[in-house]
Amino acid sequence: MKLPIPAWAGSLVFHLFGLLLLFLLVRSTPDIRGAPGVERTDHVGIVLKSESQDGSVYHNETETFEKSQSAGGSAGAAESTEFLEPLTANPTFNPSQFLPTTPKNVIGPTAVESASVDSAQADHLSPRPGTGLGGSGAGTGRGSGSGATVGVFNLTGTGYRFAFVFDRSDSMRDPGNRPIQAAKAELIRALDSLQSVHQFLIVFYNEEPSIYPTGERSARLIYATDDNKEAAKRYIRSITPAGGTDHEKALVEAARQRPDVIFLLTDGEAKDDLNAAQLDRITRLSGSAQINVVQFGFGPEPRGRNYLKLLAAQNAGQYQYIDFR
């Protein structure tokens, strides 16, 4: 009589047989860890993590996956690494987008845009002889063009700002209106030598100054545009001689504008001469302006002390005497 085999015994035999097969399988698998010539290859990547109310979100170049903040979150994080891809040679992340931008083609401070300058500022910025941007000489001017060399008879001056102070007293009509006509023609010729970047002022005078531009309460320099020069020529042609002579008032009006060059033309006699105090005032007001003096006369140049000649000498100018006999 055969005894029955207990169920637990059958189960034990079955499990022992399974363990034996597993042991034999593991023993037959070669262990390559650390073997010569065999390299271990692992994938390395970078993942960005952002937090939200729904949990943690991980981003790599190709996929986005989430990790729950539940109790099983740590296990999910460990398992999530299998989704990471190796970094490619051209990552989509561009760090330059977070850097401050710098204007191109700028060395040093940022370039400043050109701003408009009103007439008062432009007059203040006007270069003077020897002090302009070009070092010595008349400077570089504003905009385009260059300093003009202007002549009145045989006297010349170079700069950008010119004042013409011309005598219109009654004595300028003799002989035969020749002195006043010669003065007008020379002044018009001088205006024609100016370009639009230059400035000018005209003062005709007897006992009182007559200023161009007309209608002004005080003298001012204007640009030598074609329109301004044509209007000035009409004013010049309208002048007629009359009255006596007062050099100082007219010269003070011109000197206050600080031009580069002042041309004084007069037939003044000794009785009309400037005194020492007047000379000093005009020199002080004119700054570094050059003052050239043309004196008309009838007969040889007068001998003795000549304050007109002294005015030119004190202000780096030239003097010329012209005999109208």
Image (cartoon, rainbow, N blue to C red):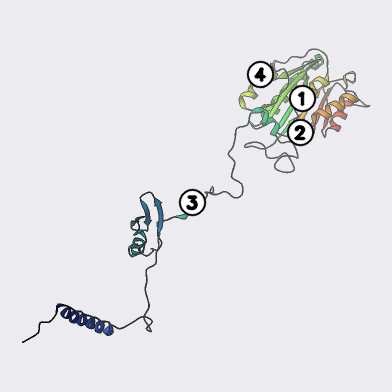
Q: Which of the two discs, 1 and 2, labels the residue nearer the N terminus?
A: 2
Query: Distance of mark 3 from mark 4, alpha carbons?
Result: 66 Å
Residue drawn at the location 61% of the way across and 26% of the way down: 226
Query: Distance of mark 2 from mark 3, alpha carbons?
Result: 63 Å
Query: Can you identify the residue that label 4 sits on?
Result: 234
| Residue 141 visible in the snapshot | yes
Query: Can you identify the residue that label 3 sits on?
Result: 98
Q: Nearer the viewer, residue 107 or 4?
A: 4
Query: Can you identify the residue that label 1 sits on?
Result: 254
The image shows residue 276 at horizontal and vertical percentages of 90, 25
Classify residue 212 by image quadrant: top right
Task: Count residues near mark 1 (Cα–Cα under 10 Å), then give few for <14, some for 14-19, many for 20+.
Answer: many
Tag 1 and tag 4, C-beta contact below 8 Å: no
The secondary element bearing badge 1 is classed as helix
User: Is residue 213 found left or right of 85 in the rendered image?
Assistant: right
Q: Nearer the viewer, residue 288 or 184?
A: 288
Closer to the observer: label 1 or label 4?
1
Quadrant of the snapshot with the C terminus: top right
Task: Count residues near mark 4 (Cα–Cα under 10 Å), then give few for <14, some for 14-19, many for 20+.
Answer: few
User: Is residue 324 found left or right of 191 in the rendered image?
Assistant: right
Quadrant of the snapshot with the N terminus: bottom left
Closer to the observer: label 3 or label 4?
3
Task: Count residues near mark 2 (Cα–Cα under 10 Å), then give few for <14, some for 14-19, many for 20+.
Answer: some
Specify the farthest residue to the right.
304
